[in-house]
Image (spheres, helix red, strand yellow):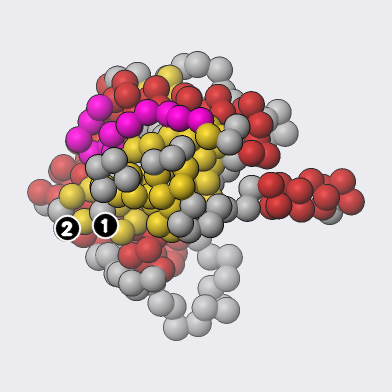
Amino acid sequence: MTLLAYWKGAYEAWIDYPQRSGKLLGGRYRIERFLGVGSFGLTYLCCDLHSNDLVVVKQAKPSKKQLGRELLRRESEMMEALKLPEIPASYGLFEADKQLYLVSEYRQGQTVEQLIFERRAVYAEKDALRIIRSLMAIVSAVHEQGIVHLDIRIPNVILRGERISLIDFGLASRIGEPARVETEANEETRRRRTPEVASDLYAVGHFFLFMLYSGYDPDDKEALTGVSWEKELNVSAEVKRMLRKLLQLDLPYTDARDFIHDLDASLQA
């Protein structure tokens, strides 16, 4: 790491430090707790003192300057355009202390990341297929409105019983518009961030793998280091075929409906 990169990281960590619990934002939203940080935003669980409801308030990262503000405005527009029951509603933007914030609906439940790594949830193949099928219903509906999410990951999917929600549209884009990836971005980033359907399906493939790996416990972890998922995971031939297409190891799916067709066939088998 160069000295310049070190100081840049230190500066961003300082300027992007989360605000304290109890602080009032915009004279209305009291921070209850910090939820997390993403590439371009800091997210808080807040109490709306006008309604006494819990809401999510996302702050554009100060270190990202104008780009962070533009992406937050764009996220609000995307959520307003979609208006799907499985996606939190946007309650609009506000500015306070020269910072821009987005207020959205709070969805109760736990992220798949929390369920796997904190609750130690284990998903058998059929369980994972059912959740992926529910997720794909949302993803397909988003695609039908000409939008791709571009950040489908286990921290961005919330489960509460049978209810599933897709959150964080901070990187969402219109299908076919110019990609916002940096010129030095690696191939993995390009596969995830290019505004096309294949990017979301590629991300769903990795999401699927996380769920399948939740029950993985090799006898000799050290001996299996570097072994591919195809050898480590005991999955059906059909699931392996779907994963290879999602991960673009074989001819990929052309749209969400093709994948959903295969999911339904596998669930009915």
Instruction: Give the x, y percent position of residue 27.
Output: 43, 40
The kind of residue tagged 1 is Gly
Is residue 61 or residue 20 the one in the foreground? 20
| Left or right of residue 87: residue 44 | right
Kindly give the residue lying farthest to the bottom in the view shown.
219
The residue segment tinted magenta is 83-95
Q: Is residue 98 left or right of residue 203?
A: right
The image shows residue 217 at horizontal and vertical percentages of: 41, 77
Q: Is residue 152 visible?
A: no
Q: Indicate the secondary structure of the residue bearing disc 1.
A: loop
Mark 2 Cα shell of 10 Å, populated few (<14), some (14-19), many (≥20): few
Residue at the right extreme? 3
Are the residues tagged 2 and 1 within 8 Å (C-beta)?
yes
User: Which marked residue is nearer to the observer: mark 2 or mark 1?
Assistant: 1
- Residue 122 location, x and y as percent? 29, 69
Q: Vertically, is 211 above or below 166?
A: below
Q: Of label 2 and label 1, which has the lower sequence position? A: 1
Which residue does the image show at 32% across and 24% down from the upper left? Answer: 80
Identify the element where label 2 is drawn.
loop
Q: Can residue 99 be seen?
A: yes
Mark 2: which amino acid?
A: Gly
Q: Residue at x 18, y 50 (%)?
A: 163
| Residue 85 in magenta stretch | yes
Q: Give the residue drawn at x 65%, y 35%.
A: 64
- Asked if the stretch drawn in magenta spans residue 260, the answer is no
For label 1, the crowd category at 10 Å Cα-Cα, with few meaning under 14, some 14 to 19 and many 20 or more, is: some
Q: Which mark is residue 109?
A: 1
Residue holding disc 2: 161
Name above or below for residue 106 compared with residue 224: above
Q: CA distance from mark 2 to mark 1?
A: 8 Å
* Left or right: 171 as drawn, with respect to 135: right
Front position in the image: 254 or 162: 162
